[in-house]
Image: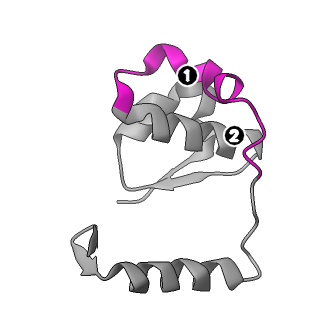
């Protein structure tokens, strides 16, 4: 079972949902070729611990591809700072 924002579902249901998103014409695959250090460099000084590594990496990818990282986590706004704030879409 997986739990996302209070919604519990079976793993196979989660995988099915992810595959449905991938089939949408708006879906674009982002290569993870950019080096991790290069992606997080503008915000590395704000990292507080290992739990922010994933957020920093995804934010760096969004900035690299000139896109936005949609998040429910207000902490990502602080992590982005003025350098990458334009690449965060905070969902309340």
Q: Residue at x 37, y 28 (%)?
A: 50
Whole-Å distance between the Cαs marked 2 and 1?
11 Å
User: Within the image, what quadrant is residue 33 found in?
Assistant: top right
Q: Position of residue 2 (x, y in %)?
A: 29, 71
Which residue range is magenta in the image? 31-50
> Residue tagged by mark 1?
43
Q: Residue at x 65, y 29 (%)?
A: 36
Report if residue 35 lies within the magenta region.
yes
Report if residue 55 lies within the magenta region.
no
User: Within the image, what quadrant is residue 28 found in?
Assistant: bottom right
- Residue 79: mark: none
Task: Give the vertical position of 43 relative to 51 (above or below).
Answer: above
| Element carrying mark 2 | helix
Q: Residues within 10 Å of mark 2 (few under 14, many from 20)?
A: many
Task: Give the vertical position of 77 relative to 69 (above or below).
Answer: above
Q: Which part of the image, by quadrant, shows the C terminus?
A: bottom left
Q: Residues within 10 Å of mark 1 (few under 14, many from 20)?
A: some
> Residue tagged by mark 2?
63
User: Within the image, what quadrant is residue 85 found in?
Assistant: top right
Q: Position of residue 39 (x, y in %)?
A: 67, 30
Nearest the viewer among 46 and 17 is 17
Q: Residue at x 56, y 26 (%)?
A: 82
Which colour scheme appears in the figure?
one colour
Q: Which part of the image, by quadrant, shows the N terminus?
A: bottom left
Please tell me which of labels 2 and 1 falls first in the chain: 1
- What's the magenta bit mostly, secondary-structure-wise? helix
Q: Position of residue 73 (x, y in %)?
A: 35, 48
| Element carrying mark 1 | helix
Q: Residue at x 76, y 35 (%)?
A: 34
Q: Find the residue positioned furthest to the top.
A: 45
Say how many tags the image has: 2
């Amino acid at each position: 079972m997986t739990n996302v924002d209070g919604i519990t579902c079976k793993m196979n249901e989660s995988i099915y949902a992810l595959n449905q998103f991938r089939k949408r014409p708006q879906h674009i695959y982002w290569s993870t070729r950019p080096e991790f250090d290069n992606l997080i460099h503008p915000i590395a000084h704000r990292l507080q611990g290992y739990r922010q590594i994933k957020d920093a990496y995804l934010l760096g990818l969004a900035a690299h591809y000139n896109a936005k990282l949609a998040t429910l986590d207000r902490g990502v706004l602080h992590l982005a700072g003025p350098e990458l704030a334009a690449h965060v879409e905070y969902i309340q």
